[in-house]
Image (cartoon, grey):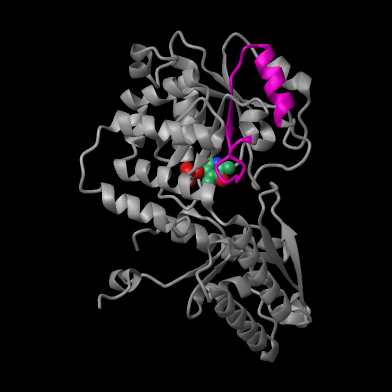
């Protein structure tokens, strides 16, 4: 029998309790998508017809008039911004990123100017648009959005993400009402959201999702919205969208993942995730210097995570050193450590294979036991850790 693929390629057999991360291979692609992709790869198809089929499926699930599949949600931001500038004018589409003669300003609340591996605002600028931040990092009022709209305004972008500031922003409905009262379309980046309908229902003209996140599809982006704007977004494939193209496998895989989503046993998945959280809670509870709680998802996806707070004096290790020990161990386990400087990390149960929750519990207790047995507190310098990470990014491919 052939070796498992990661072994063949000499890759570490990581366990992902970090969440759905591009840098870790996104999500576990559902078997329906894997089968559909395998079936279509050797065949020819008429791509615009395949995208028409995708449009119907996206429309059914998202409650939109139309939709199509692009390379990523990030590509969807760039292409939909482009569409708001050019409409269906093919000559304007070919001229981008030159926006001479077009409306070319895009509004975004300052607290939404986040990064997901790349800056959201760069996705806007890639189309040739200029970014106009609205309000302050933690406060945006309706008059600030209304006052930022000019005759140059092409679109307004709204980001739903755990990275974004979670208070003081305009609610989506109010954001849409103000933008629409001045004829400005609203694009919602909902890359990681489970709710396929609510943002369009709240008034968004375009909603964007990643195929490869909670849906368990292949790498891709879903553009859903009004027919005119989806069409203008699709037509960008004749211009700047060429470098963001998705193949037949991405379209077919996304259709299959969406169809599977309709039939998925969501309750059963929640029960499995809850069982993993309960196991971790039970195994870690009461350990010296460790406090565990089950935390809901910050953007209200139906997903809980285990928050593991580590008090170094009692645990004899810092949260970040524990996270690093997990990722260096056998097997390597990648925890969710975006906020680790505050002394905690999360365990995300949404990407586990059968039995991996036990491995995670065993490895964590093993590292905690080892730290307790050490005479010194394991506490590396956070600044040096950040510098090491940065150096390792720029050192690629070494
Ligand atoms: C993941 C993410 C993106 C990027 O999505 P891709 O499909 O990977 O390009 C954009 N916005 C938010 C809020 C995200 O979480």
Residue at (51, 17) in percent of width and height: 104
Q: In this view, does 356 lie above or below 134?
A: below
Please say whether residue 180 is one of the residues in the magenta stretch.
yes
- In this rendering, position of residue 94 left or right of residue 319: left
Q: Percent x, y for residue 273?
A: 63, 65
Answer whether residue 242 is visible to the viewer in this image. Answer: yes
The residue shown at (51%, 55%) is 21
Q: Is residue 140 above or below residue 280?
A: above
Residue 191's place in the image compared with 26, above or below, is above
**Above/below status of 6 relative to 88:** below
- The percent coordinates of residue 8 (x first, y second) are 28, 72
Q: In which quarter of the image is residue 57?
A: top left
Choose top left, top right, bottom left or bottom right for residue 392.
Answer: bottom left
**Measured from the top left, where is residue 264 in percent x and y?**
54, 54
Magenta span has 244? no
For the question of whether residue 223 can be seen, the reply is: no
**Location of the C terminus (image quadrant):** bottom left
Residue positioned most to the front: 263
* Number of numbered labels in the structure image: 0
**What are the residue bounds of the magenta stretch?**
172-197
Between 241 and 246, the residue placed more toward the observer is 246
Residue at 74%, 34% in the rendered image: 169
Residue at 52% over, 22% down: 226
Classify residue 343 as left or right of residue 59: right
The quarter of the displayed image where residue 35 is located? bottom left
- In the picture, the quarter occupied by the N terminus is bottom left
Residue 25 picture location, percent across and down:
43, 58
């Amino acid at each position: 029998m052939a070796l498992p693929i990661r072994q063949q390629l000499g890759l570490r057999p990581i366990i992902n309790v970090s969440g759905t991360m591009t840098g870790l291979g996104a999500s576990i692609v559902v078997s329906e998508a894997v089968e559909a992709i395998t079936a279509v790869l050797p065949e020819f198809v008429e791509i615009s017809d395949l995208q028409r089929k995708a449009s119907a499926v996206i429309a059914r699930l998202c409650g939109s008039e139309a939709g199509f599949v692009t390379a990523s949600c990030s590509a969807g931001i760039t292409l939909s911004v482009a569409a708001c500038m050019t409409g269906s004018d093919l000559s304007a589409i070919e001229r981008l990123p030159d926006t001479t003669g077009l409306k070319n300003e895009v509004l975004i609340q300052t607290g939404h100017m986040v990064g997901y591996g790349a800056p959201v605002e760069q996705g806007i600028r890639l189309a040739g648009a200029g970014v106009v931040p609205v309000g302050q990092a933690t406060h945006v009022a309706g008059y600030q959005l209304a006052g930022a709209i000019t005759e140059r305004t092409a679109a307004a972008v709204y980001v739903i993400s755990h990275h974004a500031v979670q208070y003081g922003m305009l609610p989506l409905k109010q954001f849409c009402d103000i933008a629409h009262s001045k004829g400005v379309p609203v694009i919602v980046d909902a890359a990681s959201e489970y709710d396929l309908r609510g943002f369009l229902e709240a008034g968004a003209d375009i909603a964007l999702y990643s195929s490869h996140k909670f849906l368990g599809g292949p790498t891709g982006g879903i553009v859903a919205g009004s027919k005119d704007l989806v069409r203008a977004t699709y037509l960008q494939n004749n211009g700047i969208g060429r470098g963001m193209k998705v193949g037949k496998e991405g379209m077919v895989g996304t259709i299959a993942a969406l169809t599977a989503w309709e039939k998925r046993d969501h309750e059963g998945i929640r029960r499995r995730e809850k069982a993993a959280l309960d196991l971790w809670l039970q195994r870690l509870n009461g350990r010296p210097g460790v406090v565990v709680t089950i935390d809901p998802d910050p953007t209200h996806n139906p997903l809980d995570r285990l928050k593991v707070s580590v008090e170094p004096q009692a645990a004899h290790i810092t949260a970040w050193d524990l996270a690093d020990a997990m990722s260096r161990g056998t097997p390597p386990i990648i925890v969710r450590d975006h906020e680790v400087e505050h002394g905690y990390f999360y365990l995300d149960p949404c990407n586990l294979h059968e039995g991996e929750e036990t491995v995670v519990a065993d490895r964590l207790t093993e590292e905690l036991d080892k730290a307790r047995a050490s005479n010194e507190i394991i506490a590396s310098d956070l600044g040096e850790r950040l510098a090491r990470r940065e150096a390792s990014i720029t050192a690629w491919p070494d």
